[in-house]
Image (cartoon, rainbow, N blue to C red):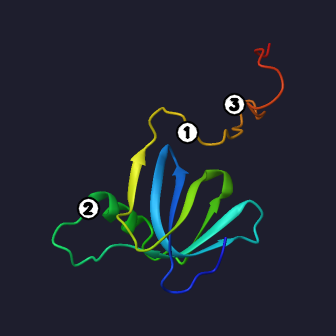
Amino acid sequence: MTESSDDTIFKVLFHNQGQVFEVYARNIYQSEMYGFVEVEDYVFGNKTQVVIDPGEDKLRNEFEGVQRSYIPMHSIVRIDEVEKEGVAKVTDVKGGNVAPFPLLMPNKDGGSNGGGSNAPKS
């Protein structure tokens, strides 16, 4: 990732709680925290527009006052350098050929559901 000049804008798509967030930011860095990407200086459309996109408004409210976000690398779908910002949006993940990297979630007994045998425990 790279630090950018003020006129460079990045489009960042990432998975978050069963949805794909598309946001625009001026600065993207590889974080010193291993496995994270830093996103800062979010760019949203002009708030004085007569028609306000509800998806963009949701994201604007979500990231209002956020100085910097640390997004896990495995949640990133794509980062593009673009000429100008577009409309930030949230879309639900519906089947298809792209899926988030599987996460290991703890079972009720405290073990993880990844790796090892798929046989049920007795």
Q: Residues within 10 Å of mark 2 (few under 14, many from 20)?
A: few
Instruction: Tell me where residue 42 appears, x and y as whole percent.
Output: 47, 74
> Which quarter shows the C terminus?
top right
Q: Which type of secondary structure does the marked residue at label 3 adopt?
A: loop
Q: Are marks 3 and 2 in contact (CB under 8 Å)?
A: no
Which numbered tag is attached to residue 98? 1
For disc 3, the neighbor class at 10 Å (few under 14, some 14 to 19, many from 20) is few
Q: Which mark is residue 53?
A: 2
In the drawing, does residue 44 fall left or right of residue 93?
A: left
Left or right, 116 with reference to 97: right
What residue lies at 56% left-to-right and 62% top-to-bottom? Answer: 79
Mark toward the viewer: 1 or 2: 1
**Percent x, y for residue 119?**
78, 15
Q: What's the amino acid at mark 3?
A: Lys
The residue type indicated by label 1 comes to Val
**How many marks do you count on the picture?**
3
> Which mark sits nearer the N-terminus, 3 or 1?
1
Dot 2 amino acid type? Asp
Can you identify the residue that label 3 sits on? 108
- Residue under the image location 69 percent in, 62 percent down: 36
Please rate how many residues cluster around mark 1, counting C-alpha atoms within 10 Å: few if below 14, some from 14 to 19, many from 20. few
- Looking at the rendered image, the disc whose residue lies closer to the viewer, 3 or 2, is 2
User: Which of marks 2 and 3 precedes in the sequence?
Assistant: 2
Do residues under tags 3 and 1 come within 8 Å of each other at their CB atoms? no
Is 17 above or below relative to 110?
Answer: below
118, above or below 86, in the image:
above
Q: Quadrant of the N terminus?
A: bottom right
Q: CA distance from mark 3 to mark 2?
A: 41 Å
Q: Residue at x 53, y 64 (%)?
A: 80
